[in-house]
Amino acid sequence: MQRLYTEEGRSLPAIPWERYPRPQLRREDWLCLNGDWTLESAGRAQRVRVPFCPESLLSGVETPPPVGERMVCTRSFSVPEGWSGKRVLLHFGAVMRACRVSVNDTALGSHDNGYLPFSFELTGALRPGENELRVELVNDLDRRYPWGKQSVKRGGMWYTPCSGIWQTVWLEPVPETYVRALRIETGENWVAITAEGVSEGEVLLEGERYPLRDGSVKIPVAAPRLWSPEDPQLYDFTLTSGEDRVASYFALRTLSVKRFRGVPRLCLNGKPYFFNGLLDQGYWSDGLYTPASPEGFAKDILAMKSLGFNTLRKHIKVEPEQFYYDCDRLGMIVFQDMVNNGDYGYIRDTVLPTLHFQKRRDKRLHRDGESRRLFLESMEGTVRLLKNHPCICLWTIFNEGWGQFHADAAYDRLRALDGTRFIDATSGWFHQTKSDVDSLHIYFDPLHLGKQPLPQFLSEFGGYVWKLPAHSFNTEKTYGYRKYDTREAFTAALRETYGSELPPLVRQGLCAAVYTQVSDVEDETNGFLSFDRAVLKVKPEELRGLCEDLQRALEEGCR
């Protein structure tokens, strides 16, 4: 296997990812705890660079502990003098999978979801001068918990696991009473803002001040500019309550389903819109789950926009909020997957469905009560974390049957959490009765529409391979679908798909399509970008016009 660095990964700063990690609830004062920590496991101490998992090149770990082996990560820190008299919060973006946290031998708490952020107050545990932060953790790949596509035996569509601290760790001072979270709801010409943890204060928006009443305020927006990939308008605001002041933003956009010539269409801002997407798995050659720098997200987004795409399906992973902020500000729609848990069965979940055995009732699948509870808990946490981001237009609950159970009940639960976005309850197959789209995965058959009377969604297809050995992780094995030996043949196949195969389906009712994928991932060499992000395999001028033609094909089908 080749050790491949991205351009940003070749020269990391002493404190990587030193950027405020919470774009929609920003405070000016904070302290980043990324950088060199000590990792101890099985009696051996090594240096580890946070926020990169020990299995990654960027972590600096020479011998990663085996998956399932317990680790202890420690570092010292000092609280800035100006924080005296304030409460101090300790935040973790994400730790894979379970951890216990202490400061100066005072236990702060534990966390067991490897994809969601968590925080502790450590004010009472602090002492003058240096403090010792200790994180005891293990990635046991317990399949009752969300595990994504990590595998001890990586290969094919399963990837190297990611253990330990893989997102930013940081400290933040707050007053006695402070804004704990923001809830933002929007319509076509209004925004409603609720500040959790406070009852009084005011919002400053476009030079006007609006007082909070019981922690909330609803504000009309005159002459609104609606958010879209073509015009990603964001409205900045600040919220002040007592001694606390936070900055945030929102966007105005609507999602709906309307019928044109009797065919249901997904609409953005009241108009039929073709969601032209790519599968985005968020793996990096040197950082695995974490790009070398925050700029890595923006570079991927802009590269895909240059090809004509307007949507990313964030596949089986929850990213740091920086990713969603970059999609908000740069104009990239996100279809967000929930992270799977439960068991995967190759015959049940892949072979038989690929052979068109795609009908299966799911009420008795994955019957372990604890696993079901943890999945729903994680789904709710994902929605709470990301709901304010306007880029997210669709939630995916289950993918290809992985961990699927009672999808109709899960749909109802998610709809109660978020009544504004589209929901793909069962991506690919094992459809039940409730979903907002008819979701199909087609890799081996000719592209076609489904049979359900719902907006048609080709949620996975393509996966064409053109392998660049010098930029590939695995030089011996190749995973993908159609394989091409030259760039010219690869490009011609893409142009045939986007220029000839998709437009007739769009006219007939196809509303969204997600091609596999943004980048190569380990054995998979079916990306538009190489795994090290060094090569964009297609020139923008070769594909962009055909992608833009899909919106025109949709408009023709609606006339």
Image: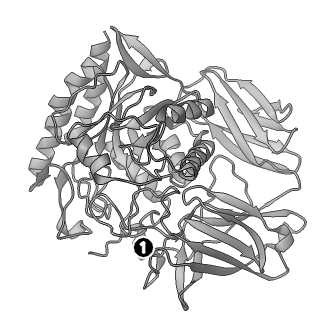
Q: Residue at x 30, y 20 (%)?
A: 509
Percent of width and height locating residue 390: 55, 36
Q: Residue at x 50, y 53 (%)?
A: 319
**Disc 1 residue crowd, few under 14, some 14–19, many 20+, Cα 10 Å:** many
Is 215 on the left or on the right of 314, as rendered?
Answer: right
Percent of width and height locating residue 60: 46, 81
**Residue most extreme to the bottom:** 43
Secondary element under disc 1, as helix, strand or loop, is loop
Residue picked out by circle 1: 56
Look at the image and tell me in which quarter the C terminus lies: top left
Is 117 on the left or on the right of 338, as rendered?
Answer: right
Percent of width and height locating residue 407: 47, 35
Look at the image and tell me in which quarter the N terminus lies: bottom left
Quadrant in the rendering for residue 10: bottom left
Q: Residue at x 60, y 80 (%)?
A: 72
Q: Residue at x 48, y 59 (%)?
A: 143
